[in-house]
Amino acid sequence: MSELQSMIFETADRIFADHVTHDLIAKGEAGVPASNLWQDLNFAGLPKALCSEEAGGIGGTWRDVFGIVKATGARAVPLPLGDIMAAHWLADQAGMEMPEEAIPVFAMGKKSARGMTIDVELESALPTHLLAWEGETNELFLVALAGQMGSRSLAGARQLRLDIPAEQLRAGAKLKAPQLTPITLGAMLRAAQMAGAMETALRLSVDYVNERVQFGRPIGKFQAIQQQLAMMSGHVASTVRAAEVAFETIREFDIACAKLVAGEAAEVVTDVAHQVHGAIGFTYEYQLQFLTRRLWAWGSEYGTISYWAERIGGSVLREGADNIWPAVTGNRLTL
Amino acid sequence: MAKTSASTAAPWAPWNEAEMSADFFQFQPFNLPPEAEALREEVRGFVAKELNERPLSELGHTWSGSDPEFSRKMGEKGWIGMTWPKKYGGHERSFFERYVVLEEMLAADAPVASHWIADRQSGPLLLRFGTEEQRCEHLPAITRGERFFCIGMSEPNSGSDLASVRTKAERVEGGYKVNGRKIWTSGAHRAHYMIATLRTDSKPEDRHGGLTQFLVDLKTPGIHISPIEDLSRRSHFNEVLFEDVFLPETARVGNEGDGWMQVTSELAFERSGPERFLSCYPLFKELIREIGSDGDRMQRVAIGRLTARLVTLRRMSISVAGMLNDGANPALEAAVVKDQGAIFEQNLPNVARALVDLAPTVEGQSPYQEILGTLLQAVPSFSLRGGTREILRGIIARGLGLR
């Protein structure tokens, strides 16, 4: 990690560690905003970490904030810091003014006959606005939230679909030739969060099997347990590496791979983590559920395994047998 | 619900600790540098020239296929012993440059088996633990692609439990006398030398301490090499019998009793390379050709899943190369890549069969069917060779702090 990376990571992780408890996550899922946590993060300037210094930001790159986004997953932080950083980043990229008190989250917009449909998974009651990115025109729209409820995701997020009539729509700004699309930006964030959640699920599992005694010894001494955790750890390592690459290159293809690998790994990780924990891991009291429920939810947000697999596979087949290897080694595969 | 030890052991503890890091592994973010990429076109030009018009029966063997002439040509290009010191015939190039040569050879299905073991592990072992005389005698010949090695580890009663080897090297006047039997020795019938792990001290309480490694000239009287057919009737591996074989003092590699330490470091090299996920690449390529440029949804989804895994494994493998380049010991990360790589490779022929309705063949007409036939009959060995899946996961479990 570079100096900037470790500095902002340590700042964020310290704040997470100070605030995020079982109780705070439970309250967050029940709709209570984590206001104190937000105050500290805001005071540290983290929501605008990706904005230029002229725009009041830290001037960080996505690579610089990878550790932070991963940590929001690792600690099941009940506040969508990654989605908020993304909204500020988009606004800054497009030169769009953000109202002083606004807490915006990134959302996907799609123009319809009557106006625009906005989809968002809102992980906290704290945000005040959506910053909707319309993928065809690359226009950004700031939409105030007004207590809409929607359905709930397994992670406790409000799943909102807002239909905004055309007469109420006024684009705030336009992105010029963005490197990403709305769904790849969302997928990149979720891949990193999933990587973090998997790391904690692995850590909890290892600690638990070293503590839990049956047949006169810690169950981690049994090969049956060791083999499962070893296999699981390989999937965790793959997810972390793939997500890290996505934040390094910001290429759509790498993001698609990261989200797909995360989705596949999540199946193994949730399975094994619960299996080695036994009944305690299935309780609300124990914290594993905060992670596994998020892994199930995030796996479906911004593209499932089959969504990304079909896009990657279609691209590979179009490339053709003899061009695949040069395209892989030249990092030239696209979606 | 019954109380468990976990509920009394403060299950929330890690949540609020700053040190919650789960950094069991260090896959550092390395990328291939420009000088390594610069080599790629040259390697591609070479294999395109050398490997055109091969019979179907030679396809799909990747690093199990051997051709001494091809190895000599690679030696001429300077692509064997690439990272070794120049004074031993090496080329002092980076692990990244070596990585590019390896992955291009694998992707091209090149017959590299003759020199592969010497380049990957016997040479590095001699470089690290051998005498100056041993290095000068063997390393230059290896880099020229003229001297081939095999690995004498497994025995009829010592497989995963390598420390139980019983082939004995007894001290005699001027050296050692060896009796016993090695088995599953890949390429022994084509190799000039073996690095053998032998028992020099038979005290049963010192399983690990009683092992020593030797550099064995396979022409020495008393050595009998018998090829063993695998299930496809190919003979890659052998039984090697030692009957009163005399080895001079100068054949010993390292100190008596250091064999276990040396053999485990050798195994880290054995497990670290791109051959642990690219052995099936020729099938992936031909599968894409069979499906064609569109495919149906099921085919696109399956190819997408395979591609994402392949690309991710490659990134992890490049990390391992980077750590080797920095002089680190990524034995644990190598075990992870090999385990994940074997899952990928062993799954690939089954995915292919689910996507394309063509039977595997052994004396067939189409490259796809022939490679599928070859690989279906090879993949069971992928989670056996170089350490079984169970042994690797045991190593990973130790890395996790479970053993």
Image (cartoon, helix red, strand yellow):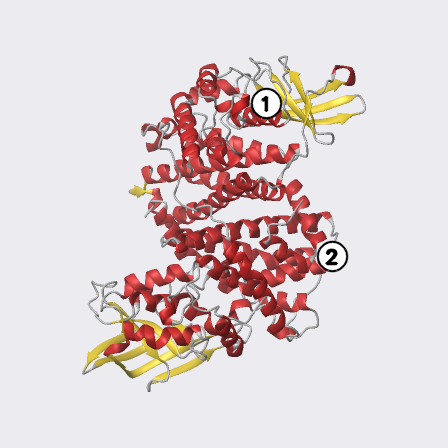
What residue type is disc 1 on? Val
Tally of numbered tags: 2
Say which residue label 2 marks.
Answer: B292
Q: Is residue B147 left or right of residue B105?
A: left
Check disc 1 and report its element: helix, strand or loop: strand
Q: Looking at numbered disc 2 in the image, what kind of residue is underneath it?
A: Gly
For residue A23, which quarter of the picture? top left
Q: Reply above or below: B349 against A302.
A: below
Q: Is residue B334 visible?
A: yes
* Mark toward the viewer: 1 or 2: 1
Helix, strand or loop at label 2? It is loop
Q: Percent x, y for residue B10?
A: 33, 27
Q: Residue furthest bottom?
A: B221
Q: Residue at x 71, y 20 (%)?
A: A171
**Residue at horizontal 48%, vertical 34%?**
A64
Whole-number angstrom distance, CA of label 1 to CA of label 2: 42 Å
